[in-house]
Image (tube, rainbow, N blue to C red):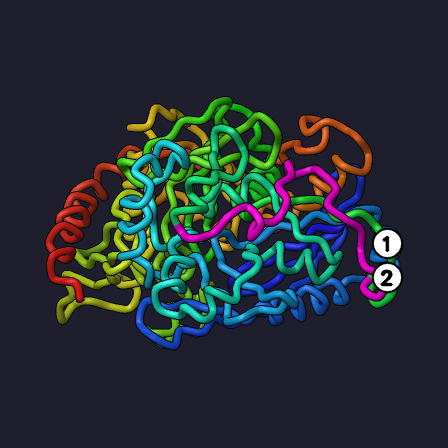
Amino acid sequence: MFLGIDVGTSCVKAVVTAETGEVLAQSSSDLTVSRPHPLWSEQAPADWVDAAHKAVLGLDAALRKGVRGIGLAGQMHGATLLGSDDKPLRPAILWNDGRSFAECAEIEAAEPRAREITGNIAMPGFTAPKLAWVRNHEPDVFAATRTVLLPKDYVRLALTGEKASDMSDSAGTLWLDVAKRAWSPEMLAATGLDESHMPRLHEGPDVTGVLREDVARAWGMDRVPVVAGAGDNAAGALGVGVLSDGQGMLSLGTSGVIFVANAAFRPNPAEAVHAFCHALPGVWHQMSVHLSAASCIDWAAKACNVPGPAEFFALAEQSGAACGPELFLPYLSGERTPHNDPHIRAAFLGLGNESTTGRMAAAVLEGVAFAHADGIDALRNAGTQSDELCVIGGGSRSAHWGRILSSVLGVRLVYLHGGEVGPALGGARLAQIAVTKASAAEVCTRPPVRAVIEPDLALAASLAPKRARFRAAYAALAPIKE
């Protein structure tokens, strides 16, 4: 058996898989996000470790005892700054934090080849601009920083005592030469750092250490190996068998991602497409990233006094797609692809006396779909073609939303058994590759298909005018944001 641990934004999830690939059990422990100022998004690193312990201990003791290896996955881009004692110097700055917009320009001015080296435009969500912000605004903290770790890698340090990371997660720091799969001295220097501040780099299935004795004893398992793992999107892709050129995935979690595997490095920074390493050697991927997806459902349900997401989806389905003029722009935390705009905010437009909660719910589902359509257009402009996407994440539970997404994106959506398990499954699969020496193709197979949704041309046609209004609305709102 193999254990995958996903250090997410809203929770830490742990899953145990059999060597056949079957998910035997899963458990989670919730996390909270602190937003002390506008644009800020932070978490206490100790909370990740506590939640990891709770999630693992929520699994049956007999299953824990049978675990032979552990793989880590996690939210990307978070900046965890450690001092000489390896303790955090401040709360971690998260992926959806937008405070470092000015520092992005500083980095690209300091290293004019930044986009060539990294294959990506500098964005506030990436790790490097966060460190530049700390250097500018918290110089004492910056001076005391000895190591910078990503969220899952801080958990690794707590579990094994080792400072290590993988290529897929590290590609999102803006410090990696993504084509060479190595730290870039030039990009590190642009933020006043060098390689001594960085963890060791590994490919996803590489063993990075073993469980500390006290952790193994507390978890009731042997001192098993812990592999490098992957960033959440790359891990989620492995969980649904997306590892070959052109295979794709749609992730509908807190954020939304369209992920396509590439046999070569194919950057397109001009439209804020992410071009990163995959979690396997010699494979890369492209992503369009949207900072709010299923989180819009949670927010809108609460704002509209609807009991929860299930009831919200039901209201939207009862009202029907394209049921009214209501329009929702899903930019609760700003946006990445294709706008690279941390300051834009969400909006409801077209509300009237006849607007109902159901019609507003329908507009929310449509708005997230329109944002993803902007993203897939950017991927297509980068040369990526994919007519089928596997769907993972909490949003995969709604077939009605799937019909809207499929029609707006113009792609077939494939729903898989266990698709809601997400990145933790990919982490467990990487551990299985390391322990059994099996190939990625043997281990990272597609789970059984649960449902397939084909694009509805009539629905696409009825939503096309709303999408045109959606794009015009962003152009109108962008100049008047705070």
Q: Is residue 426 above or below residue 150?
A: above
Instruction: Name the one closer to the observer, 278 or 21.
Output: 278
Crowding near pointer 2: few (<14 within 10 Å), some, many (20+)? Answer: some
Mark 1 and mark 2 in contact (Cβ < 8 Å)? yes
Indicate which disc residue 223 carries: 1
Q: Is residue 258 above or below residue 220?
A: above
Q: Earlier in the sequence, mark 2 or mark 1?
A: 2
Residue 366 visible from this viewpoint: no
The secondary structure type at the circle numbered 1 is loop
Q: Where is residue 79 in the image (x, y as percent from the top left)?
A: 49, 59
| Residue 348 occupies quadrant | bottom left
The secondary structure type at the circle numbered 2 is helix
What residue is pinned by disc 2?
Answer: 213
**Which contiguous range is marked in magenta?**
191-215
Q: Is residue 195 magenta?
A: yes
Q: Position of residue 89 (x, y in %)?
A: 54, 70
Instruction: Name the one closer to the observer, 67 or 79.
Output: 79
Q: Position of residue 426 (x, y in %)?
A: 64, 43
Q: Is residue 194 above or below residue 42?
A: above
Indicate which disc residue 369 carries: none
